[in-house]
Amino acid sequence: MSKWKDFEFCAAGWDKKRWDLRYTGENKDLVIPEKMIAKAGEKATIAISAANGNELESITLPKNIYDVWLGTLYGAKSLKKITVDPENPYLKDVDGVLYTKDDKRLIKMPCQKTGTYTVSDGVEEIEVTAFQYSHLDEVILPESLKEIGNCCFQYSELKKVTIPKSLPELEDNVFSDCRELEEFSFLGDTSIQYGYVDMDSEMEKRISGDGFTQTAECYLLACLKSYPNIEKCRRKFIAAAKRGKREK
């Protein structure tokens, strides 16, 4: 493990292509040293965490960071912006949001951004937990989008989402605990990938309001429209709705 002031840095993978970087200091503006990243060699993926992760307001990435690990800075609830050295050939920031240089992946959206955000045209993938705890009201997704990572919008304050035709499938947990959703729709035939063995029983719980996660009504209804066992379970679902404990 390499020791730098306020940092712990070590190889995490057997091939040394992933390194764990933990910030142990108290500064709310995290600047990652270029010389420290050089220890990882070329094209290493860096997983970033911080002892004061929920208090960090900004992150500055040096020119030699190749990639950032999925789900990095999980739950960084105070983050306002991410800045990347303009000479970095792999990553870039667009108004404080972290993208790959080729615009194909959106890696991290700072939680503190508000209003409506339009994801850049050409983006094909949005990473795991990228918008987690976001204060945005609406995210406009591009027609180029092909994949959204697990728990991408979990605990966000989104009120409106439209899924483009280009997205072939969506993990069920992408919008888990999005309690503020008021408008949700699919423009195409996006299929929902459910993670439960007995999904009929789980869907019944969600309709009644007894599910393990808070599912927004508009999202639940959008899923039901394409639910494969809707006819078989219709009577159960109607009964669940009648005994429901939902707000709407």
Image (spheres, rainbow, N blue to C red):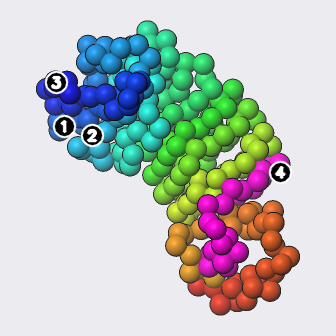
Select label 2 or label 3 by which is in front.
3
Answer with mark 2 or mark 1, whichever residue precedes in sequence: 1
Q: CA distance from mark 1 to mark 3?
A: 10 Å
Q: Which residues are magenta?
A: 184-206
Look at the picture and state if 45 lies above or below 223: above
Q: Quadrant of the C terminus?
A: bottom right
Name the residue carrying label 3: 4
- The answer to which quarter of the image holds residue 60 is top left
Q: Image point 70% across, 84% down: which residue? A: 241
Residue 236's x, y, as percent?
A: 75, 85
Q: CA distance from mark 2 to mark 1?
A: 6 Å
Name the residue carrying label 1: 24
Report the amino acid beneath label 2. Ala
Looking at the image, the residue that sits furthest to the front is: 14
Answer with mark 1 or mark 4, whichever residue precedes in sequence: 1
Is 222 on the left-hand or right-hand side of 44?
A: right
Q: CA distance from mark 1 to mark 4?
A: 46 Å
Name the residue carrying label 2: 50
- The reply to whether callout 2 and callout 1 are in contact (CB within 8 Å) is yes
Report the amino acid beneath label 3. Trp
Magenta highlight on residue 86: no
Magenta highlight on residue 195: yes
Give me the disc on residue 189: 4
Q: CA distance from mark 4 to mark 3?
A: 50 Å
Answer with mark 2 or mark 3, whichever residue precedes in sequence: 3
Q: Nearer the viewer, residue 226 or 109?
A: 226
- The reply to whether callout 2 and callout 3 are in contact (CB within 8 Å) is no
Which SS class for mark 2? strand
Q: CA distance from mark 2 to mark 3?
A: 14 Å
Q: Is residue 35 visible?
A: yes
Q: Image point 70% across, 75% down: which residue? A: 200
Looking at the image, the residue that sits furthest to the top is: 87
